[in-house]
């Protein structure tokens, strides 16, 4: 019996190991291209930056762009959390701000094929590849505020310009690594918060999440409480007030996604990262 069990186990392990992630599938349009970012001195060139125009989730204009950003003008980093079903789970976006251009936002996504539905359970079992999206906030925030009407909340990080720059460079390295070599998305271990956790801990050890991993990293809706605890967002404002001021959804929906001042306007009334 032990030998038979071992043979079955080895067979299952061999079958499991035969699954390999791929970039070559028939992807849904909004995840059809992966970004890459080239650096020449202080100039960043972002290829396959997504700038879709969303009317509904099914009705949109596809637009992929190449944009340039100046590393020397990074001013900070912000976090968006968008909620669609209760307080426990939210999707995380990280947005880098610049003194001379609109923010550059990154999202870690489940890269679905056309006709493929998302299942959190299937996400444990090598069912989906991971994707980065580099986007304009009018696309990636607007999709969630306008098309999906999610509860979007914005938190300004207390990162210095230097810390934000280091985090951006860590993102760039991982974005280019993923473009060169596909990897699996995993509901628990490789998702929109745990990947960011590893990137942040590589450049900001004071913000490193405690191990064993704090449950608020996995229950991402509760992440603001942990960010406040480790000093990544304002600690001189009560958490309940920070969350109230962070709710930008209604304000954002009053704005046009064609407004070039969209990013500046959704930040009105949101506390800055540092007093």
Image (spheres, rainbow, N blue to C red):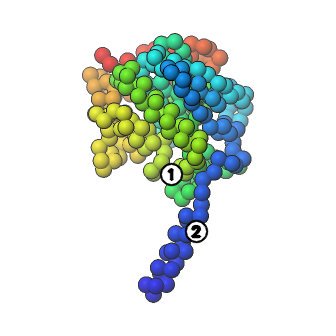
| Residue occupying image coordinates x 58% and y 68% | 15
**Horizontal placement of 170 versus 146: left or right?**
left
Please identify the quarter of the rendering in which residue 247 is found.
Answer: top left
Helix, strand or loop status at disc 1: loop
Residue 254: x %, y % from top left:
58, 18
Q: Which residue is mark 1?
A: 186
Q: How many badges with numbers are in the image?
A: 2
Question: Depth check: 256 or 68 in front?
Answer: 68
Residue 25: x %, y % from top left:
69, 49
Q: Is residue 109 visible?
A: no
Q: Is residue 16 visible?
A: yes
Residue 218: x %, y % from top left:
41, 46
Q: Which residue is mark 2?
A: 15
Q: Say whether disc 2 or disc 1 marks the residue closer to the N-terminus.
A: 2
Q: Residues within 10 Å of mark 1 (few under 14, many from 20)?
A: many
Helix, strand or loop status at disc 2: helix
User: Considering only vertical position in the picture, is 23 above or below 232?
Assistant: below
| Residue occupying image coordinates x 53% and y 37% | 175
Question: Depth check: 209 or 180 in front?
Answer: 180
| Residue occupying image coordinates x 69% and y 44% | 27
Spatial CA distance of label 2 from label 1 is 18 Å
Q: Residue furthest bottom?
A: 1
User: Considering only vertical position in the picture, is 148 above or below 76?
Assistant: below
Nearest to the eye among marks 2 and 1: give it. 2
Please identify the quarter of the rendering in which residue 52 is found.
Answer: top right
**Horizontal placement of 63 versus 125: left or right?**
right
User: Considering only vertical position in the picture, is 60 above or below 254?
Assistant: below
Q: Quadrant of the C terminus?
A: top left
Q: Quadrant of the N terminus?
A: bottom left
């Amino acid at each position: 019996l032990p030998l038979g069990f071992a043979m079955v186990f080895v067979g299952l392990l061999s079958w499991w190991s035969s699954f390999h992630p791929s970039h070559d599938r028939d992807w849904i349009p909004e995840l059809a291209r992966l970004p890459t970012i080239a650096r020449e001195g202080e100039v960043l060139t972002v290829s396959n930056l997504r700038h879709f125009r969303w009317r509904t989730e099914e009705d949109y204009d596809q637009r992929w762009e190449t944009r340039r950003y100046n590393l020397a003008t990074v001013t900070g980093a912000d976090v968006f959390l968008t909620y669609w079903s209760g307080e426990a789970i939210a999707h995380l976006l990280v947005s880098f701000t610049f003194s001379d251009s609109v923010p550059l936002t990154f999202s870690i996504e489940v890269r679905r094929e056309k006709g493929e539905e998302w299942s959190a359970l299937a996400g444990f079992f090598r069912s989906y590849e991971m994707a980065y999206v580099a986007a304009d906030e009018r696309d990636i925030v607007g999709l969630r505020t306008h098309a999906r009407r999610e509860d979007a909340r914005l938190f300004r990080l207390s990162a210095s310009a230097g810390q934000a720059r280091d985090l951006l460079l860590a993102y760039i390295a991982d974005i280019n690594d993923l473009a060169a070599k596909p990897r699996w998305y995993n509901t628990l271990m490789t998702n929109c918060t745990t990947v960011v956790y590893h990137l942040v801990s590589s450049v900001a050890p004071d913000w490193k999440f405690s191990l064993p991993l704090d449950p608020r990293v996995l229950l991402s809706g509760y992440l603001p409480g942990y960010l406040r605890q480790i000093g990544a967002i304002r600690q001189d404002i009560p958490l309940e007030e920070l969350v109230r001021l962070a709710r930008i959804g209604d304000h954002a929906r009053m704005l046009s996604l064609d407004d070039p001042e969209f990013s500046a306007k959704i930040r009105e009334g949101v506390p800055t990262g540092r007093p």
